[in-house]
Image (cartoon, rainbow, N blue to C red):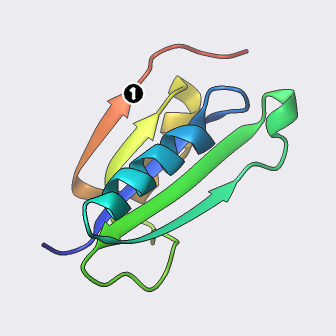
């Protein structure tokens, strides 16, 4: 198995950080090397939140390069669109169509 790249996106309060930590823990418990990084600048005010999770046999960087994400998990529709450029051509999207104004 190579490296699996999962990008989580949404707004503050949706559980992006928790979801990424759960995935990272499950991958680690399954024996994979895991790297995780999060960005939650204005999260308290409903701002953008992203988290990168990478796991596989050998992972050295926590950040996913643009166009290399295997999965985009977007818990808010516009945030999903904002980070869609991270997906690789055959990448998959899990999208919550709810909009947070």
Q: Is residue 67 visible?
A: no
Placement of the N terminus among the 4 image quadrants: bottom left
In the rendered image, which quarter is residue 58 located in? Answer: bottom left
Q: Which residue is mark 1?
A: 95
Q: Position of residue 78 (x, y in %)?
A: 57, 29
Up-down relation of residue 1 to residue 90 (above or below) = below
Q: Is residue 27 above or below residue 59?
A: above
Instruction: Answer above or below: position of 81 versus 41.
Output: above
Question: What residue do we see at 45% from left, 67% from top?
Answer: 66
Quadrant for the C terminus in the image? top right
User: Disc count in the image?
Assistant: 1
Q: Nearer the viewer, residue 73 or 18?
A: 18
**At x 75% / y 48%, what residue is drawn?**
40
Callout 1 crowding tier (Cα within 10 Å): few <14, some 14–19, many ≥20: some
Is 49 left, or right, of 98 in this rendering? right
- The percent position of residue 16, horizontal first and vertical second, equals 58, 38
Q: Position of residue 38 (x, y in %)?
A: 64, 57
Quarter of the rendering containing residue 97: top left
7 displayed left or right of 26 = right
User: Which secondary structure lies at badge 1?
Assistant: strand
* Residue at the left extreme of this rendering: 1
Res. 38 visible in picture: yes
Q: Which of the 4 image quarters holds residue 68? A: bottom left
Residue 15 at x, y = what percent? 60, 31
Identified at 26% across, 69% down, the residue is 31
Residue at 49 percent of width and 81 percent of height: 61
């Amino acid at each position: 198995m190579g490296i699996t790249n999962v990008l989580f996106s949404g707004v503050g309060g949706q559980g992006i950080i928790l979801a990424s930590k759960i995935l990272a823990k499950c991958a680690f418990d399954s024996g994979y090397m895991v790297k995780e990084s999060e960005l939650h600048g204005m999260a308290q005010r409903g701002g953008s939140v992203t988290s990168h999770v990478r796991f596989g046999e050998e992972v050295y960087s926590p950040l996913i390069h643009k166009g290399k994400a295997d999965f985009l998990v977007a818990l808010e529709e516009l945030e999903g669109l904002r980070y869609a450029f991270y997906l690789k051509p055959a990448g998959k999207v899990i999208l919550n169509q709810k909009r947070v104004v």
